[in-house]
Amino acid sequence: MMKKTYKLIDLDCANCAQKMETAIKKLDGVTDASVSFLTQKMTIETDGDEAALNELMKKVVKTCKRVEPDCQIVL
């Protein structure tokens, strides 16, 4: 299992953070996820290795862009 935290830039509201978290948790390969508006951080947990996590993050970025187009994830 791998767990990694990413910094978020321009996450505008707590509601968007919640929507992003819900959408990320539905992605294949994600065992757990949390998105915090207050700390502007996102934590992703996966059963896969580093390569699988990197691949997964491409999907996470696309998912987040749909919810909050201005938000950037520092990879």
Image (cartoon, rainbow, N blue to C red):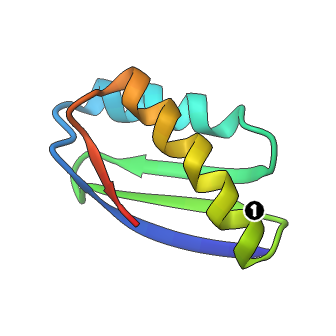
Instruction: Identify which residue is drawn at 60% across, 38% down.
Output: 24
Residue 22: give x, y in percent of width and height: 57, 30
Instruction: Identify which residue is drawn at 59% across, 59% down.
Output: 44
Residue 71: give x, y in percent of width and height: 25, 40
Q: Which residue is mark 1?
A: 46
Q: Residues within 10 Å of mark 1 (few under 14, many from 20)?
A: some
Q: Is residue 41 above or below residue 28?
A: below
Quadrant for the C terminus in the image: bottom left
Q: Is residue 48 left or right of residue 36?
A: right
Instruction: Identify which residue is drawn at 73% across, 50% down.
Output: 30
Q: Is residue 72 left or right of residue 20?
A: left
**Residue 4 quadrant:** bottom right
Instruction: Identify which residue is drawn at 75% across, 62% down.
Output: 46
**Residue 54 quadrant:** bottom right
Figure label count: 1
Q: Amino acid at mark 1?
A: Thr
Q: Secondary structure at mark 1?
A: strand
- 58, 14: nearer the viewer: 58
Residue 68: give x, y in percent of width and height: 30, 27
Quadrant for the N terminus in the image: bottom right
Q: Is residue 62 left or right of residue 65?
A: right
Q: Is residue 37 above or below residue 47?
A: above
Q: Is residue 70 above or below residue 59?
A: above
Residue 69: give x, y in percent of width and height: 28, 27
